[in-house]
Image (cartoon, grey):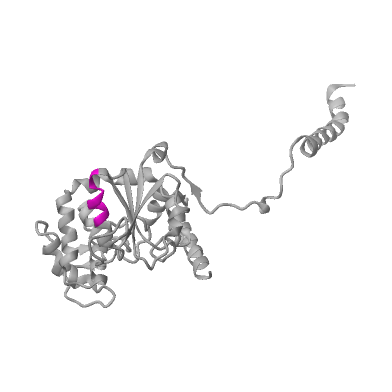
Amino acid sequence: MSLPALWKWLRIPLLILLLSIILFTTLFLHPSFPPLTTFKIPHYSSTPPTPSHYNLTTTVAVASTTQENTTWLSHSLPPTFQTAIYVADDPNGPLHPPLNKGHEPMSYLSYIIDHYESLPDISIFIHAHRRSWHTPSAFSNDMSLTLHSLNLSYVQQTGYFNLKCEELPGCVTHINLTSDDYDPFIRELGTLRDTWPELHPDVPMPETLGAPCCSQFAVTRELLQRISRERWERYREWVVKTWLSDDLVGRVWEYTWHFILTGEAGRCPVQRECFCRAYGVCFGKEGELEKWLERKKAEVEGG
């Protein structure tokens, strides 16, 4: 029998044998897997912190009052974080500002002054509440989740980082200091303009100011110490002596911190880059982050 005739006769049995071998090895020699639909496909990729992240000393400076519950700080922060909890209305407490005035700026400034010579690598300034809209909705408005996700190496690289990546409210040019128009939603506008020479006597007033809201941020020791302790004391003295209400003092400093620490009038992040670099929440395509944030916001609002 010629080879072509032999191949024509054997090809069907050989094909059946090959398929049988493949079927056997698939069913019996390889582990079985559940259907793809049972896997929870993540919405984003997580970027792990660099090794230096774990070597950075970090203190969370908290502005609080006796009416606020700060017990969550003792068990819900990353284990290497230290705390400095300032209680504004407790003059007998271990940490307190000289006067209960001006909301969080008074406590933040007191922390910087009190610890100026022994600041950690990174100081994180936050309000006392664990959950609030002041905290990124990406982490269910939960400060504990936010701080557990924060990449300290990124903070060390940038020097100053507002914990909110969302642009609104506050960006891009939230406050037009050249405008005389009254805006009931930006009550601090006229106040910022009027108090600029008091806070920054040697610095020209910019045309606009813009930064994410809410006065919660992380900053390195180098940036804090680039400003003399005496100047920090003058800032606190301004809070003590100002005729402004506590609310307006807080609003003025909300859009002053980034300028004092960075010298930039506008400090508005690109939301997509901010979440990826600072928190490891990274998306590959345009629009995916926004859709994910909308879902997270709906989850929070839905309880």
Q: Is residue 54 above or below residue 186?
A: above
Region of the chain picked out in magenta, as a range: 110-117
Query: What predominant SS class does the magenta segment belong to?
Result: helix
Count the marks: how many? 0
Residue shown at 51%/64% (left/top)?
295
Residue shown at 18%/72% (left/top)?
190
Residue at the extreme right: 1
Whether residue 116 appears in magenta in the rendering, the answer is yes
Q: Quadrant of residue 194?
A: bottom left
Q: Is residue 101 above or below residue 161?
A: below
Q: Report if residue 207 is visible in the image.
A: no
Residue shown at 28%/59% (left/top)?
96
Q: Which quadrant of the figure contains the N terminus? A: top right
Whether residue 171 appears in magenta in the rendering, the answer is no
Residue 102, image x and y in percent?
A: 24, 67
Residue 174, image x and y in percent?
A: 27, 66
- Asked whether 95 or 149 is in front, the reply is 95
